[in-house]
Amino acid sequence: MTQPLSGYTVGVAGDRRGDDLPALLEARGARVVIAPTAIRRPVNAYRWVSPADLAPLHRLIDLIIGRLVDAVTFAAAADVHALLTTAAPQDDAILDALGADVLAVCVGRRTAAPLRKHGVPALVPTRNAVVEALVGELPRRALSLEVAGHSLTLRGHAAVLDGEIHLLAPAPMAVLRTLATTPGSVLSRAVLQRALPRGGDEHTVEMAVARLRAAIPGVVQTVVRRGYRLAA
């Protein structure tokens, strides 16, 4: 490891807290976050207990439906059932997202079974190969294209323009993702309005476009009386 890591946040599994990896990453300039690690015990089955505060789970559901995360990992079938149960009556929307734009990663075939029952394809690595599977699969799935002579890649809630990461709010990200699915095509405000995660009107679309332009200048063009498109 020789390159500087300033500006990067790196998660390190809690069971590696005692080795040299966190210190090495920090010495290279990274912000290190120690992630809790589950301890496997000889029990007959996993069970999921509803937390006292469901707000983080509802936030995750919103992020999945809005295509603002690249992937979701599941350690047990109980995790899948809990997500779908909590997401009701938006379970169709979350299944649509997991079936297309958000990668579902399941530890083992039993964990993947509830999703596959609904027609959702899942990546099924072994428990020790989850990170390796994500690192290999996510770049391949990322939407990448050329915009106005620049390289643009969409990743969850961020746009990467010529290697520089731009974090975007849900509405501007939804507009950019919708325009990027049909590069060069002009999309009306009505079409973009339907893509907004929380709905809205034409003014909401205009505000989202304005915020997108402020974050990434030169990417979106206005076509008078017709709508918007990505710059050629």
Image: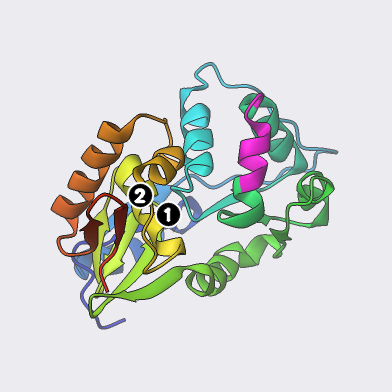
Q: Position of residue 49 (x, y in %)?
A: 67, 24
Q: Which residue is mark 1?
A: 178
Q: Position of residue 175 (x, y in %)?
A: 35, 49
At horizontal 39% and vertical 68% (from top left) the residue drawn is 183
Q: Write the start and end of the magenta stretch as one range.
A: 88-96
Residue 189 in the image: above or below residue 54: below
The answer to whether the residue labelled 1 contacts the one labelled 2, judged by CB atoms less than 8 Å apart, is yes
Residue 48 in the image: above or below residue 205: above
Q: Position of residue 22 (x, y in %)?
A: 33, 61
Mark 2 is on which residue type?
Answer: Val
Q: Main secondary structure of the magenta part?
A: helix
Question: Dot 2, how many residues are within 10 Å of its Cα: few (below 14), some (14-19), or many (20+)?
Answer: many
Q: Identify the image quadrant of the C terminus.
A: bottom left
Quick check: 48 left or right of 144? right
Q: Residue extending furthest bottom?
A: 2
- Taking depth in this image into account, of 225 and 22 the one nearest to the observer is 225
Q: Position of residue 196 (x, y in %)?
A: 41, 39
- Taking depth in this image into account, of 183 and 41 the one nearest to the observer is 183
Q: Which residue is mark 2?
A: 175
Quick check: 167 left or right of 155? left
Residue 184 is covered by the magenta coloring: no
